Image (tube, rainbow, N blue to C red):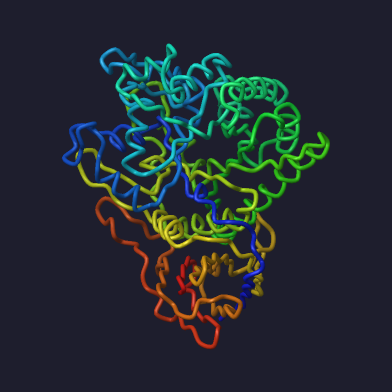
Amino acid sequence: MPRAHIGLDRRAVVGPVRRRTFGSFVEHLGRCVYTGLYEPDHPTANEDGFRTDVVELVRELGTTTVRYPGGNFVSGFRWEDSVGPREQRPVRRDLSWHSLESNQVGLDEFAKWLKLTGSELMLAVNVATRGILPALDLLEYANHPSGTALSDLRIANGTPEPHDVRMWCLGNEMDGPWQTGFMTADDYGKIAARTAAAMKAADQDLELVVCGSSGSGMPTFGDWERTVLEHSYDYVDYVSCHAYYQVHDGDLGSFLASSVDMEFFIDTVLATADHVGHKRQSKKRMNISFDEWNVWYLEEHKASDEVNDEWRHAPRQLEDVYTVADAVVVGNLLMTLLKRSDRVTSASLAQLVNVIAPIMTEPGGPAWRQTTFHPFSITSRLASGEVLRPVIDAPTYLTARHGEASLVDAVATVDGDRAAVFLVNRDLTENAQVTIDLHGLAATRITETLTLADADPYAKNTLADPLRVVPTANTGAALADGVLTVELPPVSWTAIALG
């Protein structure tokens, strides 16, 4: 049995637990919005057409921010199409996903939905095919109180109070040739800088996110960030990171170590950003918005005919059904984001409903939790206060994709006399015995233990069996003389709350 020891020092603070770490993402893609969030004929729909069963699950998930409306979708989006009387809104083609957009849900409706969930709006503007003036118009419509043409239009459309959107994304994945209106780093950096400067002229307290690389495997990775930030550093507050992971060729061991790649991604982007900041002799410290991350079986979707030329409304697209192993990786990636909470101050699990999502729905039918729902919701609920940097002494193993990785990974948070420890066992076949030194913490008792595991790491929750995989109490956890001992099943994620 592999054995690991974890040391926790109350003084080894990484940074505060950032509530924006627990953000998510809603794009007008597939059934995320239509028959996901919005289904007027559904038995649970409220007077605005939103499914209240989904609202309840989103609240349970614990999302704090939601990035909207894309994603690739935003690069062809005319925001004006999505406001005003619904019967007058045009149907448009979405070139990104080859579907039809009815615009029946737009900014004002989505903001109303967010109030039901208690989440903050993070809005993306189209700098790919539009430009500075439409971005300023959207900012005026969304945030100006009254007395201007566009703020008064919002009021006339039934929203008297401004939306007061604080976080704004300057486009999406502008380095990707799949992106409508993609650009070189030099071209994008210039338009991002000009757009950001104009938006800050309207409201200097806005928090602006410039597009980083779409992934660490992009051929321009590193150079892209450097060039873009050399243009925009003075005007923006975040650079974005996007990362998706999946099992390749059945290599579960490499997949379980995906967070090693996420750490490399974060470290490289921060080094590049700091290099630009030092060159500019800037006192600003650039932070990361990791505003797309998840498990996504992209290779399988590329081989399918989900995206075609039929131009359908809300087709079934990218509806991955997640396994226990997928949930363990999602939990581990979220742990990694917490470990870098000093500089990763915002993040968005992509996406929220139906599309590579923790929540699934059936039109006219139920909504249910995917396996990936559980580590996110539990971490969002238990993590508070400050993140501690653990010292992990554990066996390692060699992966084909990510090199050497620890069999056990961990992170902890502490908030007064309360603490939480989050653990992963990446071993494919054996339990791991873990001891955790808590002498530096005030916690003296275990208040809750939850483990996500299954004898079949590929077990899933489905419409036919939505409760196949649920977290269970870890009855092997014990605390004595300041030392916490816990046994972790193979391919598992565990959370332990202490008080």
In the picture as drawn, the residue positioned furthest to the front comes out as 147
Task: Tell me which corner region of the image, top left, top right, bottom left or bottom right, holds residue 4.
Answer: bottom right
Q: Residue at x 64, y 59 (%)?
A: 14
Q: Position of residue 70 (x, y in %)?
A: 47, 31
159 or 424: nearer the eye? 159
Is 149 above or below relative to 16?
above
Quadrant where the N terminus sits is bottom right
Q: In the rendered view, does 46 fall on the left or right side of 216?
A: left
355 or 203: nearer the eye? 203
Q: Position of residue 39 (x, y in %)?
A: 24, 33
Q: Position of residue 76 (x, y in %)?
A: 49, 19
Q: Residue at x 36, y 41 (%)?
A: 354
Task: Tell me which corner region of the image, top left, top right, bottom left or bottom right, holds residue 459.
Answer: bottom left
Quadrant where the C terminus sits is bottom left
Is 432 above or below relative to 30?
below
Is 242 above or below relative to 412?
above
Is 212 above or below relative to 313?
below
Q: In the rendered view, does 218 fall on the left or right side of 39?
A: right
